[in-house]
Image (cartoon, rainbow, N blue to C red):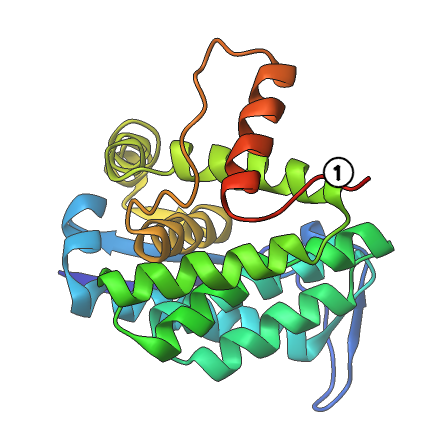
């Protein structure tokens, strides 16, 4: 499996060395394209091939953030979140934590700052305790995530548990493979390459899969439950973990 980087010129501002380029949003950033020889399925199964792609995506994002002043802070947060995923995949946990904290700093309101990155932080702490996939890791992840959620105001805690449960329900290995086969592979078959948006999406979903490892900290909700029923079920789980509703 060989991955060859092809740098395509999109909307590219001109600058002298050391000068910061001001851009409004993602549409004004350089457009990066990554050529894939073979299938995405083979790429994801190849540690060497996937690592090469991840390194190329990381290098491009780091360069874009260094060279450009991006006025759209939501785009900065998104790029930093992708970097955090790549750092996690490459066992650079200190850099992953730094990126998570930077995303939190850039949140526009207090609510988002409170909840930003809590799942990734729990993963990073658990990884410092044991190898992902082990029972010790899973217990550390459950404990750290529970502690962070319990520190939130109760309604916010409920909403975030429901969101985390949805994420673990969605990003299973079979679903990710279906996304790769049905949505992404046709692009590679047709053009032999993927753009920045697709490459960054691959980094994110693979990180979710590896980090969660089919982890279920809370019981899955039943698909035909009403939101109120799901909330009540979540409250019951919280009570079992010792977290009581606010008076």
Q: How many marks?
A: 1
Q: Quadrant of residue 54?
A: bottom left
Q: Residue at x 62, y 53 (%)?
A: 149
Q: Quadrant of the N terminus?
A: bottom left
Front residue of 104/240: it is: 240
Residue at (63, 17) in percent of width and height: 227
On-image quarter of the C terminus: top right
Q: Height in image: 228 above or below 96?
A: above
SS for dot 1: helix
- Name the image quarter holding residue 138: bottom left
Q: Residue furthest right?
A: 109
Front in this rendered view, residue 76 or 1: 76
In this rendering, does residue 42 appear at all? yes
Task: Report the front residue among 243 and 78.
Answer: 243
Q: Residue at x 60, y 68 (%)?
A: 100
**In which quarter of the view is residue 43 placed?**
bottom left
x and y, in percent, of residue 225 in the image: 52, 12
Question: How dense is the environment of label 1, judged by Cα within 10 Å: few (below 14), some, or many (20 and up)?
Answer: few
Q: Is residue 91 visible?
A: no
Q: Residue tagged by mark 1?
A: 155
Residue at 69% in and 72% down: 102
**Where residue 14 sits: x, y (%)?**
72, 73
Lateral position of residue 18 relative to residue 184, left or right? right
């Amino acid at each position: 499996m060989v991955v060859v980087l092809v740098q395509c010129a999109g909307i590219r501002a001109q600058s002298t060395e050391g000068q910061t380029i001001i851009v409004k949003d993602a549409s004004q950033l350089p457009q990066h394209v990554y050529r894939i020889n073979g299938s995405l399925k083979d790429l994801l199964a190849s540690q060497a091939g996937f690592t090469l792609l991840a390194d190329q995506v990381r290098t491009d994002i780091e360069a874009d953030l260094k060279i450009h002043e991006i006025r759209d802070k939501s785009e900065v947060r998104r790029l930093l979140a992708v970097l955090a995923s790549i750092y996690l995949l490459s066992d650079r946990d200190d850099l992953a934590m730094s990126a998570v904290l930077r995303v939190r700093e850039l949140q526009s309101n207090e609510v988002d700052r409170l909840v930003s990155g809590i799942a990734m932080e729990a993963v990073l702490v658990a990884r410092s305790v044991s190898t992902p996939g082990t029972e010790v890791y899973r217990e550390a992840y459950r404990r750290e995530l529970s502690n962070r959620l319990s520190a939130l105001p109760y309604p916010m805690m409920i909403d975030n548990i429901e969101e985390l449960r949805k994420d673990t329900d969605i990003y299973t290995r079979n679903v990710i493979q279906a996304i790769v086969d049905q949505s992404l592979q046709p692009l590679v078959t047709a053009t032999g390459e993927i753009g920045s948006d697709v490459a960054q999406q691959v980094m994110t979903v693979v990180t979710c899969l590896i980090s969660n490892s089919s982890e279920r900290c809370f019981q899955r909700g039943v698909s035909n439950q009403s939101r109120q029923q799901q909330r009540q079920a979540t409250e019951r789980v919280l009570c079992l973990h010792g977290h009581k509703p606010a008076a």
